[in-house]
Amino acid sequence: MFKRICLFVLGLFIMAFGVAFSIKSTFGTTPISSIAYALNLCTGINIGVTTFIFNASLIVLQLLILRSEFKPKRLLQFINCFVFSYFTDLTLYIVYSLNIPDNLLVNVMLIFVSIFLIALGIFIYMPTDIAPLSGEGCVEAVAIVTGWRFSSIKIAFDTLMVIISVIMCYFFYSTPWGSVNIGTVISAFMVGFTLRQIAKLYNHITGKDINIINK
C-alpha cells in the first residue's frame, strides 16, 4: 500500500509539472487545466484555488454519470483535488524560478515536455487504484459506462475542455485565447495518444499490461 501511495503522489506531482510547463510555454495551458486557468484569468483568484474548484465540480459530474456505480472511494478525489492544487502552485513557482529562456523554440519544446509529463503522470498514478484525479475520473467514468477506450475518451474530453475555456475567456476576459492557444489544441489530441504509446512501450519492455481503468 505504501508503494501505491508513493506512486500515486509521484504521478500527481509529475502531472502538475506538466501543467506548469504548459503555462510557462505561453502557448496555452493543458486542456485539463484550461478551465481552471481561465477562471484564474477571469476572476483573479489564485490558480491553486480555481484548480480545486474545477476538479471538485468534476467529482459531482462523475456522480451524475455513474449513479449507482459511483463507489464511495471516489470521494477520495477531494483529497486529490487539494494535493494537485497545491502541487500546481508549487511546480509553477519552481518552473518560473528556473529562468528558462523565453523564445519560440524553447516554448515549443515546453509544449511537448508538458504533453509527455501529463501522459506519464496519468500512466503512473491511475493504476494505483487509489482514486483518480477528477479529470481522469470523468474519463474513466465514461469508459466504465460505455466500454470505449480510455485514451480515445481522453482526447474527446480534453477537446471539450478547450471549447469551454475559449467560451469563458470570450465573455469574461480580454481575449478568447487567454488560457487556450495552439499548445492547448496540440495537447488535446496528443496526451491521449502519448499515454497509449507509453503503455505500449511498457508492455514491450516488461511484457505486462497496465490497467488504467479502475472500476
Image (cartoon, grey):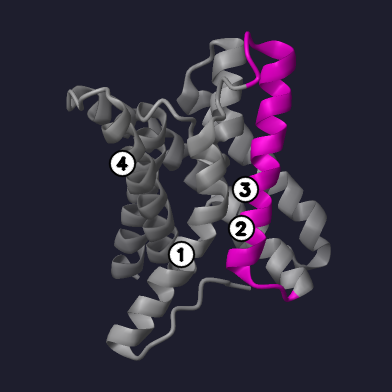
Left or right relative to 159: residue 110: left
Front label number (2 vs 4): 4
- Distance in Å between CA atoms under marks 2 and 1: 10 Å
Disc with the residue nearer the chain's start (2 vs 1):
2
Front label number (4 vs 3): 4
The disc labelled 4 sits on which kind of residue?
Answer: Met
Front in this rendered view, residue 6 or 36: 36
Checking the image for residue 86, the label placed there is none
Q: Quadrant of the N terminus?
A: bottom left
Q: What element carries label 3?
A: helix
Give the residue number, with chain letter if any, for mark 4.
109
Q: Is mark 2 on a helix, strand or loop?
A: helix
User: Is the Cβ of the residue at disc 2 closer than 8 Å to that at disc 3?
Assistant: yes
Figure check: 144 above or below 25 = below
Q: Is residue 155 magenta?
A: yes
Disc with the residue nearer the chain's start (3 vs 1):
3
- Distance in Å between CA atoms under marks 2 and 3: 6 Å
Corner quadrant of residue 98 = top left
User: Is the Cβ of the residue at disc 2 closer than 8 Å to that at disc 1?
Assistant: yes
Give the residue number, with chain letter if any, for mark 1.
195
The disc labelled 3 sits on which kind of residue?
Answer: Asp
Q: Residue at x 45, y 30 (%)?
A: 27
Disc with the residue nearer the chain's start (4 vs 3):
4
Give the residue number, with chain letter if any, for mark 2.
154
Give the residue number, with chain letter if any, for mark 3.
158
Q: Is mark 1 on a helix, strand or loop?
A: helix
Q: Which residue is drawn at 62% across and 34% down?
A: 54
- Distance in Å between CA atoms under marks 4 and 3: 20 Å
Q: Callout 3: few (<14), some (14-19), or many (20+) C-alpha neighbours within 10 Å? A: many
Q: Is mark 4 on a helix, strand or loop?
A: helix
